Image (cartoon, helix red, strand yellow):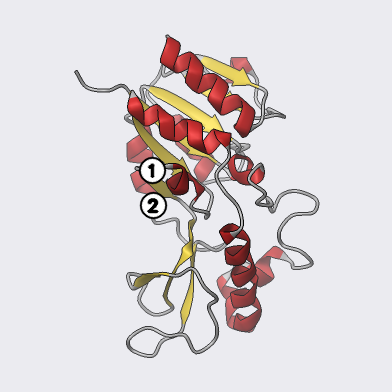
Amino acid sequence: MSKQKIVVLTGAGMSAESGLKTFRDENGLWEGHDVMQVASPEGFAKNPALVLEFYNQRRRQLLDVAPNQGHLALAWLEQTFDVSIVTQNVDNLHEQAGSSHVVHLHGELFKVRSTRNENYILDWTGDLVLGDSDENGHQLRPHIVWFGEMVPMLETAAQITQQAEILIIVGTSMQVYPAASLIHYAPSNTPIYFIDPRPNIRASDFENLTIIPKTAAEGVPTLVEHLFNR
């Protein structure tokens, strides 16, 4: 008997309780930097050293945090369900928690790639500095989707969402496109669970929508227990 397919869409709120700052908060992680300075191709062209150091700080921070109860609960779901996670987050906390099928829409902090060959990708947990290059001498850059760049995994994410028998949305406002469009790929009448401490949608906005007004660390374990006990 095949396992029921659960698709989980996660955003910054998923990792906030692990101690990772979300850039949309008032004191967000862009500390003193206009977002276009540190997260755009133009910013990188203008001041690559600043951009590299910005992501070095993010990488160091990620080395100091751990998955929270929400991450762990999603990993437990795999015992009973076929689970795919589509995340807007660039951290690896889902993988650390034990989730085995994770698609990163916006790239990964612990990877870098060539500025000339986007398919030349390396695992990277230390600092990245000017002069670090690919095999042909081209500078390496963070493996992050910056503003104005294509989201190469979006089509894959849409195909995964089309398979959902249950859709769970955690820690994302679903207001930022193109990621926000994914909810519309779920088959009609798919049960949707929306976990957010300050939900910005109403139960009447979608068919079969259940809103759980809790943080990821509280709401996900509650939902997982409910799904196990059905």
Secondary structure beneath label 2: loop
Q: Position of residue 219 (x, y in %)?
A: 60, 25
Judge whether 177 appears above or below 46 on screen: above
Q: Which residue is mark 2?
A: 153
Q: Position of residue 73 (x, y in %)?
A: 49, 31
Query: Quarter holding the N terminus?
Result: top left
> How much space separates mark 1 and mark 2, taking CA atoms?
6 Å
Question: Which residue is pictured at 68% across the width and 71% down the height?
Answer: 37
What amino acid is at disc 2?
Answer: Met
Q: Quadrant of residue 78?
A: top left
Query: Quarter holding the C terminus?
Result: top left
Q: Which residue is mark 1?
A: 157
Q: Going by the image, does 32 lie left or right of 217?
A: right
Q: Are marks 1 and 2 in contact (CB under 8 Å)?
A: yes
Secondary structure beneath label 1: helix
Relative depth, front residue between 87 and 228: 228
Which residue extends farthest left?
1
Judge whether 111 appears above or below 140 on screen: above
Q: Going by the image, does 22 lie left or right of 167?
A: right
Judge whether 192 appears above or below 62 on screen: above
Question: Which residue is pictured at 44% across the width and 11% down the height?
Answer: 229
What amino acid is at disc 1?
Answer: Ala
